[in-house]
């Protein structure tokens, strides 16, 4: 067994590097695409395509990992990121129209988003073996890394333009690959002689046989459809409240920074309430944040809404990882994590981006305004997610 200290600290650094990389491509993607001449609907469609690619790719990579336990997860993750690096550099160097941009976003979404649940599984393997890796702390520091990167990107954009964010993203991808490649591989203890090995099941089996898991996935799908537009299209909300794109970096910093405190009290909340109730709480606070942004009349109101992120998306991410770990058989945990990511950042991001892009364009011709129409959609979807999460907690008891 590798050093516990190394496993813990390197995983925390790996989380920080991943979320800094994620900020490099996501924080200013709407502004970047708008500058390249795409409309709000086009931007929503492109971000949806990126999420759709993750939906398709994540189960494939997760299933491949489950079927080939002899291949270390870090090899699958590093190969995925290397492919996205090459494509990202091409996107930086070459102007592209809609078709070329779609192709780039398919690769970035398919392999960068899909890398994250496998990175989670790299830690969960050791946690299940009894290694005290501080997962929630790593996720919290990852949020802080996202926040700080957004501030740096804001300064960078002001000086060198939004296109320069692609260079920063490429450098951070290289850093994540280096950290993943040097992370110790997990080697499971051999099964006792004569003991039948548990085989992984299909995604459809997991959904049919575990109604509690399936209902919670549906709640998460609607909840993240409500949540992600509030970061992907935050620039539109800011501009509708009198701010500018230069204010985006600070707003994203405040938003992501408030995810950090969750890391310090998450384990206590998990022991007291269980992962299922924590997901419900995160859905409630996501809906409250959408309402707070809707009723914000200026940039101060936008900033005051961001602390709700602490018990919204900040609570959701670690809670969802532990929920999967508790809810599916051991042989299906890698696939379970990928299914969770498909329902949340995958399908939730895809639907949220498409709905928001359309709402922004349609609402611009209405008295309510595009940003407000988008936020009303977020409130409605968030409310539906709360109802489904409550139903999920009533099935097969509570955890």
Image: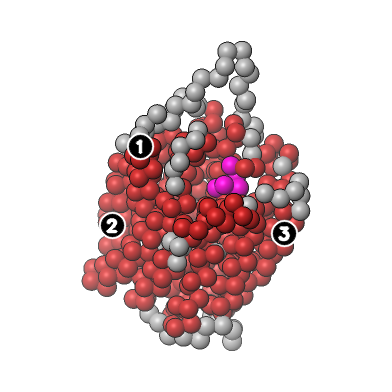
Looking at the image, residue 216 sits to the left or right of residue 135; the answer is right
Looking at the image, residue 377 sits to the left or right of residue 184; the answer is right
Query: What residue is shown with label 3?
Result: 390
Specify which label sits upstream in the sequence, 1 or 3. Answer: 1
Distance, label 2 to label 1, CA atoms, is 23 Å
Taking the magenta stretch, the answer to whether it contains residue 360 is no
Residue 179 seen from this side:
yes
Quadrant in the rendering for residue 141: bottom left
Query: What residue is shown with label 1?
Result: 183
Residue 375, position in %: x, y?
Answer: 57, 74
Q: How many residues crowd around disc 3 within 10 Å: few (fewer than 14), some, or many (20 or more)?
A: some
Residue 247, position in %: x, y?
Answer: 36, 76
- Magenta stretch secondary structure, dominant: helix
Describe the element under mark 2 as helix, strand or loop: helix
Describe the element under mark 3 as helix, strand or loop: helix
Query: What residue is shown with label 2?
Result: 168
Q: How many residues crowd around disc 1 within 10 Å: few (fewer than 14), some, or many (20 or more)?
A: some
Residue ID at (58%, 42%): 325
Describe the element under mark 1 as helix, strand or loop: loop
Distance, label 2 to label 3, CA atoms, is 42 Å
Q: Say which of 279 and 366 sits in front.
A: 279
Rendered position, 228 above or below 360: above
Residue ID at (46%, 24%): 70
């Amino acid at each position: 067994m590798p050093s516990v200290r190394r496993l813990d600290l390197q995983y925390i650094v790996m989380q920080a590097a991943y979320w800094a990389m994620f900020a490099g491509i996501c924080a200013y993607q709407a502004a970047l695409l708008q500058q390249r001449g795409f409309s709000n609907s086009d931007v929503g469609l492109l971000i949806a395509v990126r999420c759709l690619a993750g939906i398709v790719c994540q189960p494939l990579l997760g299933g491949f990992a489950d079927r080939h336990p002899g291949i270390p997860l870090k090899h699958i993750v590093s190969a995925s990121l290397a492919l996205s690096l090459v494509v990202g550099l091409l996107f930086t160097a070459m102007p592209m129209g809609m078709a070329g941009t779609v192709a780039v976003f398919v690769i970035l979404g398919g392999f960068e988003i899909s890398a994250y649940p496998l990175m989670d599984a790299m830690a969960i393997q050791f946690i299940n073996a009894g290694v005290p890796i501080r997962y929630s702390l790593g996720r919290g520091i990852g949020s802080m890394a996202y926040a700080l990167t957004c501030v740096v990107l804001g300064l960078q954009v002001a000086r060198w333009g939004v296109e320069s964010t692609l260079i920063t993203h490429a450098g951070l991808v290289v850093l994540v690959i280096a950290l993943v490649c040097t992370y110790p591989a997990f080697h499971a203890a051999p099964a006792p002689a004569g003991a039948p090995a548990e085989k992984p099941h299909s995604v459809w089996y997991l959904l049919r046989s575990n109604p509690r898991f399936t209902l919670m996935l549906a709640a998460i799908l609607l909840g993240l459809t409500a949540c992600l537009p509030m970061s992907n299209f935050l620039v539109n909300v800011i501009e509708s409240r009198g701010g500018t794109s230069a204010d985006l970096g600070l707003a994203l910093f405040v938003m992501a920074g408030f995810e950090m405190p969750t890391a310090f009290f998450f384990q206590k909340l998990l022991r007291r309430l269980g992962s299922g109730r924590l997901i419900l709480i995160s859905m409630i606070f996501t809906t409250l944040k959408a309402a707070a942004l809707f009723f914000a009349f200026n940039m101060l109101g936008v900033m005051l809404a961001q602390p709700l992120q602490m018990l919204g998306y900040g609570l959701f991410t670690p809670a969802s990882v532990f929920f999967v770990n508790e809810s599916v058989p051991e042989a299906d945990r890698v696939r379970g994590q990928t299914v969770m990511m498909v329902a949340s950042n995958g399908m939730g991001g895809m639907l949220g981006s498409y709905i928001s892009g359309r709402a922004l364009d349609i609402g611009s011709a209405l008295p309510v305004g595009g940003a407000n129409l988008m936020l009303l959609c977020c409130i409605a979807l968030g409310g539906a997610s709360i109802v489904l999460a409550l139903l999920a907690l009533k099935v097969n008891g509570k955890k």
